[in-house]
Image: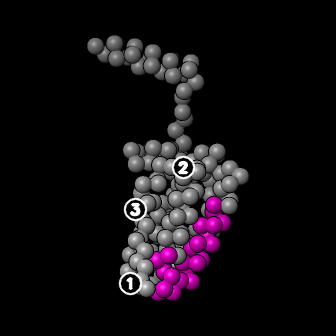
């Protein structure tokens, strides 16, 4: 029985080597799981921080206060992505818009806080709709209903 398993593993390994579908394990892939199948690059870790910040800011809106964002968010354009194709010619435009929306949110008043908070979330959605759609459902859950009063 052990010989059969050993032969199977050898054939599988040889097939993987011949087809070129070997993927070396890297630090970025070390924490892969069902939720994070591509591993953790600098950019993916930063974006998880951004999501946590948005969740905290969402709760703060109900308390009529703003939550400052970490200076680390300014590294969005220099953080290494999981996939080199992530940062194409449009990425910097999306990231600049995101940072501008964060600044607008921080400067919010009671009258425009929800609108400015949602603008931050929409900036995330617009980028992820174009680059990496996996987190879109999770990001959509951050949106707040806007209440219009006359």
Residue 84 place in picture, x, y as percent: 64, 45
**Colour style of the rendered protein structure:** one colour
Which residue sits at x=50%, y=76%?
Answer: 115
Residue 80 place in picture, x, y as percent: 62, 53
Residue 137 disc label = none
Q: Would you say the residues marked 3 and 2 are in contact, meaning their CB atoms lie under 8 Å apart?
A: no
Is 113 included in the stretch rendered in magenta? yes
Q: Secondary structure at mark 2?
A: loop
Residue 132 disc label = 2
Q: Where is mark 3, residue-wise?
A: 141
Residue 83 place in picture, x, y as percent: 60, 45
Q: Would you say the residues marked 2 and 1 are in contact, meaning their CB atoms lie under 8 Å apart?
A: no
Q: Is residue 32 found left or right of 102 in the rendered image? A: left
Q: Where is mark 1, residue-wise?
A: 63
Q: Is residue 108 placed above or below 80 in the rendered structure?
A: below
Q: How many marks?
A: 3
Q: Secondary structure at mark 1?
A: loop
Q: Would you say the residues marked 1 and 3 are in contact, meaning their CB atoms lie under 8 Å apart?
A: no
Is 43 included in the stretch rendered in magenta? no
Q: Quadrant of residue 42?
A: bottom right
Give me the C-alpha separation between circle 3 and circle 2: 17 Å
The disc, 3 or 2, on the residue closer to the chain's N-terminal end is 2
Q: Is residue 22 placed above or below 140 in the rendered structure?
A: above
């Amino acid at each position: 029985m052990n010989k059969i398993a050993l032969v199977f593993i050898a054939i599988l390994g040889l097939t993987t080597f011949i087809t070129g579908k070997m993927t070396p394990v890297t630090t970025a892939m070390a924490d892969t799981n069902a939720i994070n199948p591509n591993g953790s690059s600098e950019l993916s870790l930063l974006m998880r921080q951004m999501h946590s910040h948005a969740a905290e800011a969402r709760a703060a809106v109900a308390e009529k206060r703003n939550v400052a964002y970490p200076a680390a968010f300014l590294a969005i354009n220099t953080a290494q992505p999981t996939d080199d194709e992530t940062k194409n010619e449009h990425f910097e435009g999306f990231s600049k818009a995101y940072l501008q929306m964060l600044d607008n949110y921080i400067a919010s008043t009671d009258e425009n806080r929800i609108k400015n908070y949602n603008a931050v979330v929409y900036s995330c959605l617009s980028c992820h709709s174009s680059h990496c759609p996996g987190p879109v459902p999770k990001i959509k859950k951050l949106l707040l209903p806007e209440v219009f009063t006359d």
